[in-house]
Amino acid sequence: MDFAIVGLPQSGKTTLFHALTAGHGSAAAGTGQELLGAVKIPDDRLDQLAVLVKAKKITPLEMRLHDLPPIFSIAKGPSGTAAEALGKAEALILVVQAFEPHASGSVDTARDITAFDSELMFSDLAIVERRLDKIETSMRSGKMQERESAEREKALLERVKGYLEADTPLRTAITDPADEAALSNYGLLSLKPMLIVLNIGEDAVAEQEKTATEGRLKHDARGTRTTAVCAKLEAELAELPADEADEFRREMGAPEGGTHRVLEQARELLGLVTFFTAGEQDTHAWTVPEGATALIAAGRIHSDIARGFIRAEVITWDKLLEHKTHAEARKHAALRQEGKAYIVQEGDVINVLFNV
């Protein structure tokens, strides 16, 4: 999972990056500004399963984070590894300043989010207009079959252009999965899902949950989610031993799991389902898109397992903890035998039987 952390100047996005990566990020070669970091996503379910099977190794989900230069710099002409990271990111984490003193003179999250989205749409509009110009040129000399394909592409892009000119981010406007697939190779930035992180001050940490709720009511839309966190506090806590961090958090009146919620909401934004394999050698967390089948899940584990798929033994993680072993779960009919077409559910523990 690749996420680009972006935001207006002085929003605190780099502070959030350090909080999420616990200060273990590194500078990208040649950029002078981009930071790279990989984060293991905590999951109590995975930890409990590992204890149950006495796993020698635990493999949690991993998220790759790219802290990029201010969006205005990127939108005016992205180049180098930072632009590549922005284009390849599966989603954006937009950090919005929600504390005083504000870089623009006053706190206005709606204003800042609109300004950011405008830059994304401006970049997208330039891409779409260039492509439409090329289509017009090719249609004058193309063969009939090529012209038909070009006409379909032109119709879609003209519709996209209309959304952008109406200041509607594509993540909100494009609802047909077929259209999303058709647009996936254009590098359209406003099409990417976005998690808005309202970066509050240390004096407001007691109101963090209230701020997050109010933010969701104001800003959530299709492809957009909102949360709140004090990046400065979380970055400081990330540098402390766990017991000292817990004590400091209590003294500040800050809710627990601030950065964990950011990571979890980012994962959910992608529409991914987490399933587990629970083995003594390695207890592993995996993801597949919502609606994915057991065969697709088998392929995530290993392509050979998918090719030789016979059936999947499936049990929910909590039922496996309850019954202790697969054998005991089978006695109580809690372990199900499923075929290739089974739709993987959140929290499934899957053991795939296959031919070598």
Image (spheres, rainbow, N blue to C red):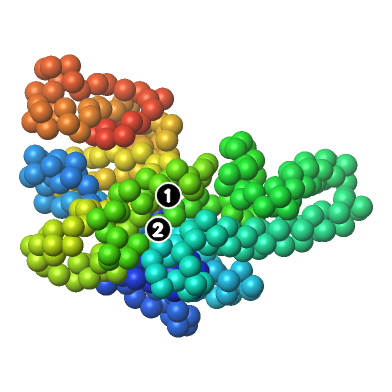
Q: Is residue 326 left or right of residue 94?
A: left
Q: Which residue is mark 2?
A: 198
Which quadrant of the figure has residue 13?
bottom left
Please provide percent x and percent y for residue 275: 29, 38
Q: Which residue is mark 1?
A: 215
341, above or below 198, in the image: above
Out of 71 and 44, give the one closest to the viewer: 71
Out of 282 and 34, give the one closest to the viewer: 34
First of labels 1, 2 by sequence position: 2
> Which residue type carries mark 1?
Gly
- Residue 15 seen in the figure: yes
Q: Is residue 61 left or right of residue 110?
A: left
Taking the spot 22% from the left edge, 27% from the top edge, the residue there is: 315
Please provide percent x and percent y for residue 172: 58, 44
Please provide percent x and percent y for residue 350: 26, 33
> Which residue type carries mark 2?
Leu
Taking the spot 34% from the left edge, 71% from the top edge, the residue there is: 15
Other residues around mark 2 within 10 Å, as few (<14) / some (14–19) / many (≥20): many
User: Which part of the image, by quadrant, shows the N terminus?
Assistant: bottom left
Taking the spot 34% from the left edge, 75% from the top edge, the residue there is: 26
